[in-house]
Amino acid sequence: MKIAVEGCCHGELDKIYETLAYLEDVNSIKVDLLLICGDFQAVRNKADLHCMAVPPKYQHMNTFYKYYSGEKKAPVLTVFIGGNHEASNYLQELLYGGWVAPNIYYMGYANVIQFGGLRIAGLSGIYKANHYSLGHFERPPYSDNSKRSAYHIRNLDVFRLKQISRPLDICMSHDWPRGIYNFGNKDALLRHKPFLKQEVEEDSLGSPPAEELLYKLQPQYWFSAHLHTKFAAHVEHQTEDYRCKTTKFLSLDKCLPKRHFLQVIDFPHDEGFPLKLELDPEWLCILRSTNHLLSLSRNKTFMPGPGSSERWDFTVSNQEIESVKEDFGNDLTIPENFITTVPAYTVAESGRSVSEYPPPDIHVNPQTTLLCTMLELSDPNAMFLGRDSSFSLDVEDAANSSAAARISDDEDVNSDGDETDDTNLTFESSIDATLDLSCNPDEIPLENDNDEDEGIGEMEGESEANISTASSGAGEVDDAEESLGTLSGIAPIVEISGLKEEEDELQEILAAQASMGASADKKVSDASASDSQSEIGAVRTAPGFSDPERSDKSSQDEREEDNDEDDNELGEILAAQAKLKGSPGQCDSSSGCQEPVSTVESSQSSRSSGSKQKYNMSSAGEGEELPTSKKFRRRNISMYAGEEEDCV
């Protein structure tokens, strides 16, 4: 079973799928699942661009609308989490997860799903201290402030993930767990991204809640993106029975030439588990038992903990799992019930500007309605529209709340559109209060584009996409490298790296970490094809990449310049590729960074052998009330047990 992992998408679905198809063809493989680690940009039409927190010059339709409208279909099953550049209004319709297009599944604010026997957890958004303890109060139409806070993670979603007690194979987050840089080649990271040095020294780079989840859940793999660089690390855990356990961390770049943005990992597969998406019964139990903790208030809310007068431990029992399976007819296959909720963009609208479209309104998605019906959950969008009276809103009424949002439009946004630092903040008891001054320093804005940094003329001679592939076999495999041809005018370099035994990997990473301090000023020699085997946890500059001069710039200026260079390439790459078509470039045989990965042992949780029934789309429409009684829910299991209907 082969799973591809991609860093930041930024709406470039066509390029990602083309690259993946080329990789499959050249290596004679078939990728079963694609995981995307955020900044997906599920923009359906120009009105959605009002809800994406980017400057106007970055408000582009890109290619997702083609998959939403049915013009194209994703060639490989795709699962993604949200980042900090998203069409938040659409993702808010599917807060518990759902199909954003046929064969493309969004994991919601937080989720656990299963695929081929693997348990995959996801946490969407990024960390911002002063929004962490607030409720999910945001709703379309957003203010300039709320369309940013909408993608900030909340303590409820982290609290729910902390209730997981059964093993996880993969975790995904957009921003990095705080401190992960201490378990990889930190010196190489800072040579590539020197503007991160201050946050690394202060140990404030990354997400404190993600750090907690890393040590609590201890998955075998953790995938991230956000910082637009490839970085690998090994984190050793000590379990309660004093056994050692390792999490392999990998962050990947964005989809651009000369970047390490894609990696394929071969996981062992038990043929008893079909290669399809399934709901996770433990997660369903957690959602149902913690629904009362949902808040839609702007006020701070705190999760219960030890010493609280209310229940604070929601660990799921085997009996609860069997009960929820029974409620779903012993078949947890996620129904293919995608349906459009707004019209898709058409080429006829290409001449119209975003300002000509009104901001979008709230929509209730039937996929969310169906899951809420089965689990007696609350749908915030239905509550905002007054369609669900079972939940007492601890917020202002809709009109007053929207007015308050507009009044407080600039309370957290400075003149540059980036968010300011916040102090005197309070966290739930499990987070260190000394982190109060952190406002997510790695929240990278898309601002101050510098058109002189990268020219199209340079790209014509150097447009190369870097694709990393790996095998996770248990034994040692000889190194191999292949120089491949062109894909749509881009000459990719596909790297196939061998593996060492896991004990050797762990010893090497420990040795590498121990030598970091002494080698801080040592220059990195260029990697050649003959000595391409990577050091564990090392990060190497992509072939053809040269760092810009940064010595006379401040840390903030450096951050903006680096990211502006990234995003400016998005527009230029289209013109460069058009020129390159018909005259493919030569492949570069130099190898890049490929981190060894090892076998993931599938979670062998017991499953019911009950009847395999197909799910159907609920007939519930936007105008219907959300049924909440258990009697009604059980009576409507029949909605899941009929003949499968075609997806819209």
Image (spheres, rainbow, N blue to C red):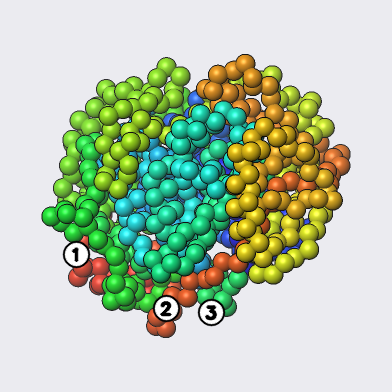
Decide if residue 479 is on the left or right side of residue 120. Answer: right
Q: Amino acid at mark 3?
A: Gly
Residue in view at x 39 percent, y 57 percent: 216
Numbered label attached to residue 607 = 2
Quadrant for residue 496, please give it: bottom right
**Closer to the camera, 519 or 370?**
519
Q: Position of residue 48 (x, y in %)?
A: 45, 36
Query: How far is disc 1 from disc 2 in space, using C-alphas?
Result: 27 Å
The residue at the point 28 percent across, 33 percent down is 425
Q: Which residue is labeled 1 in the image?
A: 629
Q: How many numbered markers are drawn?
A: 3
Is residue 385 shown to the viewer in this render?
no
Q: Is residue 492 above or below residue 190?
A: below
Q: Is residue 127 left or right of residue 26?
A: left
Q: In this picture, is 603 found above or below 496?
A: below
Identity of the residue drawn at 42% across and 64% down = 239
Q: Is residue 412 left or right of residue 586?
A: left
Tell me the amino acid under the disc marked 2.
Arg
Which disc, if any, is residue 272?
Answer: 3
Tell me whether circle 1 and circle 2 mark residues in contact (CB < 8 Å): no
Residue 491 is situated, as x and y percent measured from the top left of the image, at: 79, 43
Left or right of residue 461, residue 267 in this image = left
Q: In the image, residue 75 lies at what x, y percent? A: 63, 57
Tell me the element at label 1.
Answer: loop
